[in-house]
Amino acid sequence: MPTDFPATVTINEEGPREGFQIEPGPISTADKVAFVEALAGTGVRKIDCVSFVDPRRVPGMADADAVATGIHRVPGIRYTGLWLNERGLDRALALPLDTVGAIRVTASETFSTNNTGKGIVATQDEQRRWLERYVAAGIPVESGYVMTAFGCNFEGEVPVATVIDMVAFILELVDGAGLPRPRVFLADTVGHAAPSAIERVVGAVRDRWPDLPLGLHLHDTRGLGVANVHAALALGVDHFDAACAGLGGCPFAGHAGAAGNVCTEEVVFLCEELGIDTGIDLERMIDCARMAEEIVGHRLPGKLTRGGSLRAIRGGQVAA
């Protein structure tokens, strides 16, 4: 396995969507918009803002349309949303967000049913229809996601062979449509992964498709999120989803401690310590993390909101 860290890393900000979908709230539309706009000043290039889902199941996303239309956009930043069915895609296409195609499958039958109401086969059939819609609308297919790639709270360990099958499905689907292969994100949707699992699963995918661009969507349920990022960086992975302040979690994970994505500012801090450029202003991201805590009204998992970065200390300006 390679041990050279990448020179640059891309971090997709998931906090507004990943975070506010699980908060008990209520959180005002204005606060959500203000948070997205603050994140746009940190250097991130892609912000996942909302989920186009049934508000009866995810009440925190009931104002998704209003959030999408309320954002004052900054040129050069992509503002995206998530959909899990064709109704959600219809809503996304009608709003002023950047519609980026993704193929989404799940390696756990039980989680798939809990998350979307469809099992693996039905989900694959739906993804074929999604791809037809993408092609017809001229929407680029930039990513494929394999959820529960490292384990499931319902089914336990997920066989690596199943993950390989899901990646193969994504690639065969886009190959069959004559499209360029997308970056494939392996998602630790419920936070099962440890560094050994990162090495095992990423290694297996790399063995099968050495040139396939990979990314990781990691959750920090058991406190190993940053350790898993480090393990992935050592394997050359250079794209990560993350959530400012560690916002969020999956409401259908089957576990009360299903924490949010790995914390954006902690990933940026780790990369800086390793000499890896993310293009993100760490101090501004920490400010956004503090803003997130004010919005939700309680402490969030991110540690840099209290510890700060090391820049002040290294510059001789030790805080009181």
Image: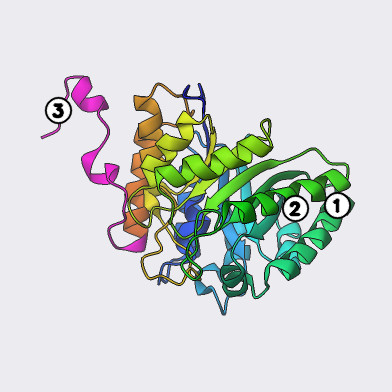
Residue 268 location, quadrant: top left
Seen in the picture, residue 80 relative to 204 is either above or below; the reply is: below
Viewer-proximal residue, 269 or 299? 269
Q: Where is residue 187 in the image (x, y as percent from the top left)?
A: 54, 52
Find the distance from the CA under tag 1 to the CA under tag 3: 54 Å
Q: Is mark 2 on a helix, strand or loop?
A: helix
Seen in the picture, residue 92 relative to 45 is either above or below; the reply is: below
Q: Which amino acid does label 1 sit on?
A: Ala
Q: Earlier in the sequence, mark 2 or mark 3?
A: 2
Seen in the picture, residue 46 relative to 192 is either above or below; the reply is: above
Q: Mark 3 points at which residue?
A: 318
Residue at the bottom extreme?
56
Q: Mark 2 points at which residue?
A: 169
Residue at 81 percent of width and 51 percent of height: 173
Label 3: how many Cα within 10 Å (few below 14, some 14–19, many 20+) = few
Mark sitting on residue 137: 1
Residue at 36 percent of width and 40 percent of height: 266
- Give yes or no for residue 5 being in the magenta stretch: no
How would you classify the magenta stretch by its main secondary structure? loop
Write the start and end of the magenta stretch as one range.
296-320
